Amino acid sequence: SVTRHLAAAEGGEGEGEESAAPATASRAEVLRHRDVARLTEAERAEVHRMLAMLRSGRATRRSRRFERAHRGRLDPRRSIREALRGGEVARLRRRRHTRRPRKVVLFVDVSGSMAPYAETLLRFAHALVRSEPRATRVFSVGTRLTEVTAGLRHRDPGTALNEASKAIPDWSGGTRLGEEFKEYLARHSARGAIAVIASDGWERGDPALLGAQLARLARQAYRVIWVNPHKGYEDFQPLTGGMRAALPYLDDLVAGHSLAAYEELSERLAHA
């Protein structure tokens, strides 16, 4: 986990190593479960440093292309070619479908109600892009749909966040998710992808429009996962208009308030 890597990195060598590493791990473990909206600036910087160390795995899907294999279906063309070259079929050749990382499309709500979480979510998005740059797209949503994938491809997390932030015109504004998903579906496709929506569901537009667009998205996507920061609390109820409209079309509704929650989401993407 990130905690173990951080402890190993800070443990150092020499006389204080035995006491320093457990203390670092203990502090990191506490921070893993803290709500990022309630952290001090120093604590948030520490969580962001740990988030930069996150290496997200990715579930795979079968592609249409084939590769050579010892087991699998017969490859008659290759077998015949080799027989023609050698004069006889010495060995039947086989092939199998190649596997590729499943695509992820992440939508990060940057409206006013999500302001305490938006930066950390974009840093999580950076970790996803770094892990699978060709199979990850990231959009900010609020009052406008904006793709920020290019900015998040920078290796340095700080630079990536700055570039993504400069591209977003509607920080801390309102939320019109229905209109933005309608725009996304008119211009892009999520076919076969895992669609991840990070939002608290405070929809200022028409919830019926949001429901209709999520129904379309669910028909395209492999899975639809909604990440709500408030889901991490026991008394959470999905009562906002956006959440009520979305629920029938979600495969998963998960927490998104802490580093531990982002690690769990990363594992979910690795095994979807």
Image (tube, rainbow, N blue to C red):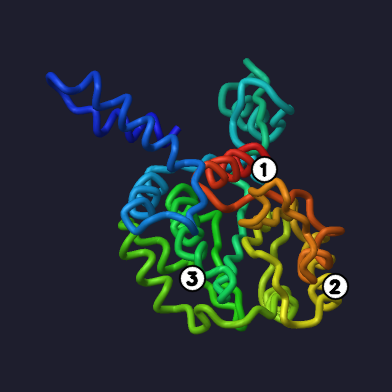
Q: Earlier in the sequence, mark 1 or mark 3?
A: 1
Residue 148 disc label = 3
**Residue 61 bears which disc, if any?**
1
Amino acid tagged 2: Ala
* Secondary structure category for the residue under label 2: helix
> Which of pointers 2 and 1 indicates the residue nearer the eye?
2
Q: Are marks 2 and 1 in contact (CB under 8 Å)?
A: no
Measured from the top left, where is residue 89 in percent x and y? Answer: 66, 19
| Up-down relation of residue 124 to residue 184 (above or below) | above
Residue 257: image tag: none
Give the image location of residue 209, x and y in percent: 82, 78
Q: Amino acid at mark 1?
A: Arg
Mark 1 secondary-structure assignment: strand
Q: Residue 150 is drawn in which quadrant?
A: bottom left
In the image, residue 179 sits, relative to residue 38, either above or below, namely below
Q: Would you name the residue on which mark 2 appears? A: 212
User: Residues under labels 2 and 1: Cα distance?
Assistant: 27 Å
Q: CA distance from mark 1 to mark 3?
A: 25 Å
**Image quadrant containing the C terminus:** top right
In the figure, residue 271 lies in which quadrant? top right
Q: Residue at x 70, y 75 (%)?
A: 177
The residue sitting at 45% across, 51% down in the picture is 127
Earlier sequence position, callout 2 versus callout 1: 1
Looking at the rendered structure, the secondary structure element under dot 3 is loop
Q: Tag 3 or tag 2, which sits nearer the N-term?
A: 3
Q: Front-most of 190 and 253?
A: 253
Of residue 123 and residue 272, the one placed in the foreground of this image is 123
